[in-house]
Amino acid sequence: MAKSCTNLKKLQEAFEIAFNIPFSTLVIPAVRVQKIGSESLLFGSAEAARHPMLVQGDIMTFDETSPAGYFLVGFWGHGVNSYAFYYSFDDGRNKICLRLPYGGVYMDNKIASQRIAGFLSAFFVFLNETRIRGASVVAIESMGLGRYRVLTAGGEKHDHKGSLLGQPRFKKALGLRWGRQRQSLQNGV
């Protein structure tokens, strides 16, 4: 868990109320986090505080521009409908940038909440499986646009372009057949 910060508990409570899943669903790296901005529930590492990547232009190039050690989590928005839940990190191996629409005036936030809860739950199971298998992941999901890449331990690239927010079936979208491989290994094939 990240080293505590004065209002991180408020973020945890807001997350659990908004999405009805435990905050522990998220992987929170063991880094010191600080509040970013005075009007938001946004927290991040020193790298994220120096340059928070919050707008579409920054996010779609996250895998090319984020520094290792970058971590950002929370709620932020501008205007009347560009509000989102953010979760981003670059651990030097994986580059994850999620900007999931939630909280805008013209959004159906009940439906958005359900989609986000399902997406995050499935995503972190998928991310854990990639780590176990020695693969690396680039996952960018931002306001209806998505781009994913898995590089397996054997050097195979699996790509998917398009949002997976509404249907978070990551292995299927990326053409990964890990379940079958595992079954084959169990059967001695």
Image (tube, rainbow, N blue to C red):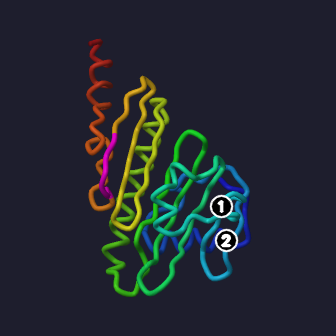
Disc 1 to disc 2, how far (Cα)? 8 Å
Mark before the other along the chain sequence, 1 or 2: 2
Q: Quadrant of the C terminus?
A: top left
Question: Is 48 contained in the magenta span?
Answer: no
Residue 31 location (% of width, % of height): 70, 52
- Residue drawn at x 61%, y 71% is 42
Report whether residue 25 is seen. Answer: no
User: Left or right: where does residue 90 sit relative to residue 85?
Assistant: right
Badge 1 marks a residue whose secondary structure is: helix
| Nearer the observer, 154 or 20 | 154
Q: In front here: 75 or 161?
A: 161
Q: Residue at x 60, y 41 (%)?
A: 92
Task: Point out residue 101 in the picture as x, y percentages from the top left corner.
Answer: 40, 71
The answer to whether residue 17 is seen in the rendering is yes
| Residue positioned 56% across, 68% down in the render | 74
The three-letter amino acid code for the residue at tag 1 is Ala
Tell me which segment is drawn in magenta.
159-164
Residue type (three-letter) at the residue carrying disc 2: Ile
Q: Which mark is residue 36?
A: 2
Q: Residue at x 43, y 54 (%)?
A: 140
Dot 2 alpha-carbon crowd within 10 angstroms: few under 14, some 14 to 19, many 20 or more: many
Q: Are marks 1 and 2 in contact (CB under 8 Å)?
A: yes
Q: Which mark is residue 159?
A: none
Q: Which residue is mark 1?
A: 48
Q: Nearer the viewer, residue 134 or 132?
A: 134
Horizontal placement of 168 versus 125: left or right? left
What secondary structure is marked by label 2?
loop
